[in-house]
Each structure stands twice: as structure tokens, then as C-alpha cells.
Image (spheres, rainbow, N blue to C red):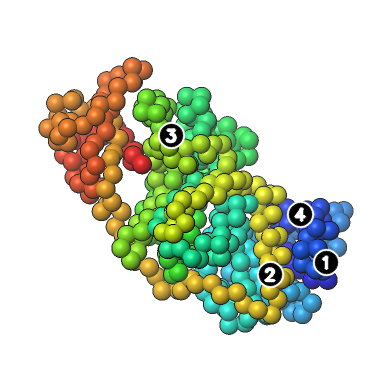
Amino acid sequence: MIKIAVMGYGTIGSGVVQVIDTNQDSICKKIGQGIEVKYVLDLRDFGDDPIQSKVVHDYQTIAEDKEVAIVVESMGGVEPAYTFVKAMLLAGKSVTTSNKALVAARGAELIAVAKEKNVNFMFEASVGGGIPIIRALNSCLTADRIEEISGIVNGTTNYMMTKMADEGCDFDEVLKEAQDKGYAEKDPTADIEGHDAGRKIAILTSLIAGQQVDFEDVHTEGISKITAADMLYAKKMGRVIKLLATSKEAGDTYTVMVAPFLLPKEHPLYTVNGVFNAVFVRGNMLGDAMFYGSGAGSLPTASAVVADVVELAKHIGRHIELEWRPEKLPIADYKQQSMRFFVRTSADKATVEKVFGTVEYIDVPEVTGETGFLTAVMKEKDYEQKAAELGNVLQMIRFH
Ligand code: HSE
């Protein structure tokens, strides 16, 4: 019997206990022995709930118990999760976490500690919830050099973009609805300003580059300035607006950014709607692949955590090599990327052409008193210069 502990009995932690209870038999067969949750670490007590018999309030109780081989961290945030996880690894226990803030900030260091102690640190659920993308990158796609990894990795914003596109609602209206449904937090900043997606693409890029990418270096724009009028223009162009977290090979580094993009029908991410997530990967041998599924929620996320527990149980006493060196990767300047830009301006067509030359106008009858146009392909730094010269830019969305 493998004894495990769960640190944090919130949405994910309670999901982990539920997944183990529900699928105990099939999970046991996969490992060759049973799993028992010996401890649950939480600040709270849970009254008459049967889980109460396992609750401890001091993480040292778990660290000091030699019977516990695997620890799940589902507390969220960098501290005290970092202190607790490091203590577990140093005590010779393998750890799995669903905590993207911890992995983005301290992943490289915790992998190194795990290696030193001949245990493992896994984090499948930290990106894409239940979608198997981390293990895919770490084992199934290791024959490839990854040229691009782009994803819809935030369910809240994808729900909002889908709703705005389908129903023509305004941003504030759809945000309120997402909050009422429990998708968006009371303080929705991390989702709608792209910070959550920024951490996730920093983790994915660290894995494909094999070294640390700091999320603070990732150029991040959210969806809070997207309007119902933008959706009308997108529809006219036969496109959808999606918040993409994207990383593209640029010489010996990557261009990494989070921003709303106008996607064409042919793009595999075009049809990813609602709270679903998907990650598109282009390998130099594989070509294109896409991973799609539930990117959040108690049971989908817990499913990925428990899959890590199974993997950890199969590798007790053996460290699985994983390249994520702590040296920081200097990422490429996103302003050197070339693409087309969709622009809305209050300037007239003559002024637009004087500054941008030949453009493609997009006319939407419902939107008056402005000019919508698509630029030619140009570098972002040149676009910025021309936009400043034009002035009166109401909106810019990148064309994929
Ligand atoms: N707030 C995140 C989302 C939760 O909406 O996708 C999963 O990381």
C-alpha cells in the first residue's frame, strides 16, 4: 500500500481524494498496489466529514512520516507551498502539484532538489488542467525540436470570448455572467489580463527550451479591451478572437507572448470554445499536433494530479530525468515579429493610406464613425511607429 498526503483540501485537493476513492480499483491495478491518503494538510477542520480523521495542521507531521512516499500539493500560490514542497522533497518524498504559480516561479529549483534526493517533482495539472500536455512534452515529443507551442490555456477568458462572439454581448455583461457561473473569480484580473496564461506559457516554454523562462519577461495583453464591435469585425473577416499564449522558435530562443489574436477558420484552435482549453504543438519531425480538453475544474484537474501520483508510484527510488535548467533564457523581442494587424481608428481613409500605404478596409454597417482596416505584413515595431503617427487608434488586434 502506497501512503500519500494531500496538502490543501480545496477544489483540487478534495477532487484528488474523490478520484482516488472512485477509481481505487483500476488505479491499484495500474500501480500493482493500493493507494491510501494518510494525511490531509489544511488550516481548517472539517467537522463531521470523514476526511477530518486525516486532517493535520503542521506540514512537518507529513515530512517526518517515513511511511508517506508521495505528496500532492494543491494549495496554490508560491508561499507557503514552496517551503512545504521543498521540505517534502528534502525528506525523500516525491511531489505532484497543480500549482502553476509555484511551478513557474520555482520549477527548475524543485526539479534540481528532486534529482539530488533521487525522487520526482511532477506538475501535469499546472497547465491545461486535465489535458495531458506536460507529460506529452517530456516523454512523447522528446524526439522533436519544438518550433511552436500555442494554446488557449485559460478557460475563463475563452468562455467569455466565445459568449461575446456567439451572442454579441459586451465585455462587462459577459464577465458578470462568468462570475455568476463560478468560472471567473471575484477579482478576475489574473484571468482577464492574461497573467494566468502568461505563467502557463512560461512553463511550457521552459520545458521545450530546457531552461528557465520567467513569466515576467512574457509580453502579456489580456482581453479586457475587447468589445462587441471587435466581434462584429472578426465575424466580417470570417475569424474569431482568441486569447492565445504563444511561443515560437526564433533562432536559438523563443518569442513568447499572450495576447488576443484573430484566428482563421483553418487554424486548429478556431473551434476551441467555451471553457475548453487546447494546446497546439508544431514539432520539426512530428508536424502539427493538438491536445484538447477540460483545462480547469475539480475532477479534470484532479485526474491529472492522480495520474502523476500513479507515475510517481511506478518510479519510487528512481529519478526521471527532466531538462529544465535554472539559467534564465533571454527570450526574443516580440516587436521583431512580423504579421498583419487589424486596426480601428477614428482617422479617415486618406490619413490611413498616407501612413500605412495600401491597406484592406473592413466595413461593418453596424459600426459607424470609424475606419477598420488590415495592414500589410510588417514588424510589430514598425506597426507601433506608424500607429503613433496615425494617432486615434481605437483598437489593434493581431492577425494570425
Ligand atoms: N482560472 C483558470 C482558468 C483556472 O480559467 O483556466 C485553471 O488554471
Query: The residue under label 2 is which amino acid type?
Result: Leu
User: In what quadrant of the picture does the C terminus appear?
Assistant: top left
Tell which tag, 3 or 4, sits nearer the viewer.
Answer: 3
Q: Secondary structure at mark 1?
A: loop
Query: The residue under label 1 is which amino acid type?
Result: Gly
- Label 1 neighbourhood size at 10 Å, few (<14), some (14-19), many (20+)? some
Q: Which of pointers 4 and 2 lies earlier in the amino acid sequence?
A: 4
Q: Which of pointers 1 and 4 lies earlier in the amino acid sequence?
A: 4
Q: Which of pointers 3 and 4 lies earlier in the amino acid sequence?
A: 4
Residue on which the image places disc 1: 34
- Label 2 neighbourhood size at 10 Å, few (<14), some (14-19), many (20+)? many
Residue on which the image places disc 3: 265
Compared to residue 103, the image places residue 86 above or below, namely below
Checking the image for residue 19, the label placed there is 4
Query: The residue under label 4 is which amino acid type?
Result: Val
Asked if the residues shown at circle 1 and circle 4 are in contact, with their CB atoms under 8 angstroms apart, the answer is no
Question: Which residue lies at the image location 36% right of the left edge and 59% below the top edge?
Answer: 249
